[in-house]
Amino acid sequence: MISPIAEQRHILTEQLPKIVLPDSYNYIAVFLTLECNLGCSYCINRFGELADPVKLLSGDEWLAGINRLVSAENLPLTLQGGEPTLHPDFYRVVNGIRSDLNIDLLTNLEVHPQRFMEKISPERLKRDAPYASIRVSYHPETMKIEALAARVLFFLDAGYSIGIWGVLHPIWAAEVLRAQRYCQELGIDFRTKEFLGEHEGVMSGHYSYIDACDRNVRKEVQCRTTELLIGPGGGVYRCHSDLYEGRAALGNILDPDLVISNDFRYCDCFGFCNPCDVKLKTDRFQIFGHTSVEILF
């Protein structure tokens, strides 16, 4: 039996108004949880100080928030984390998202393959794009490529859009490139990403703003984003740094008055940016030269 309070909450969430994203938005990130079953030393989520965990939205709450979104054609929702499959309602969320919203998944694929396939059809995680909808992270510090490749092949044979990505960390670059060759011989799409962060006192990565990530001096700037970043508790954040370090959210995805704008916002944390926000990268059309945020000094 559903309690009167739960029934009232259900009615309210069903009546939430749509959230229209600016046409300039390039990415929608849904962080179902920041928890992970791996412990990689170079995890980008821990570039700064990782905030204490927050109470997770339930599957129904996620669906009430996600299904409000109205975005540009073919702009997918990317379920990520942490490891998104660890959310207790992961399958409920995937299958409850509006059918007109495309879904991408960032995962380490430490899942039970048969259960995943029974719960989610290949068509639900597939769209017309120059890269796979299921993007599997390979971390040689904690994974074996032979086992991962076998699992990915199992998904490929079942019709899923899936590929592997490896980070070229200075310590692990040679092994990642070996893994890439191994997978390519098997017919697996394996791509590499540059390492973002510090190793032995040297900052790696290509960034649009000098000193954005040096973590020495805070500066006041005006900043605007091209990404909708939704944290595990439903908070909507200006940037990855705000999300990971537990700074105040702009609002909540369940707030009926939430409006997503394209405005510049005051920030006094420049210098403590997360590399994800200020790196030079490709946009959703795979055109290089994009940066997630624009900063005015």
Image (spheres, helix red, strand yellow):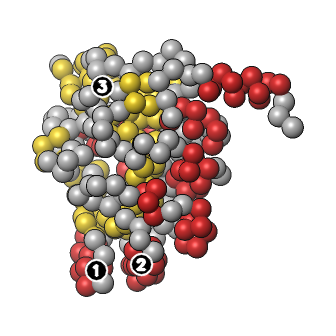
Secondary structure under badge 3?
Answer: loop
Foreground disc of the pair 1, 2: 2
* Amino acid residing under circle 2: Asp
| Pointers 1 and 2 in contact (C-beta within 8 Å) | no
Whether residue 235 is visible to the viewer of this picture, yes or no, is: no
Secondary structure under badge 2?
Answer: helix
* Amino acid residing under circle 1: Gly
Residue at position x 30%, y 84% in the image? 186
Residue 3 placement (x, y as % from top left): 84, 30
Q: CA distance from mark 1 to mark 3?
A: 38 Å
- Image quadrant of residue 22? top left
Residue 176 placement (x, y as % from top left): 28, 73
- Image quadrant of residue 191? bottom left
Task: Give above or below for 56 relative to 70.
Answer: below
Task: Give above or below for 2 relative to 38.
Answer: above
* Amino acid residing under circle 3: Pro
**Residue at label 1?**
187
**Residue at label 3?**
22
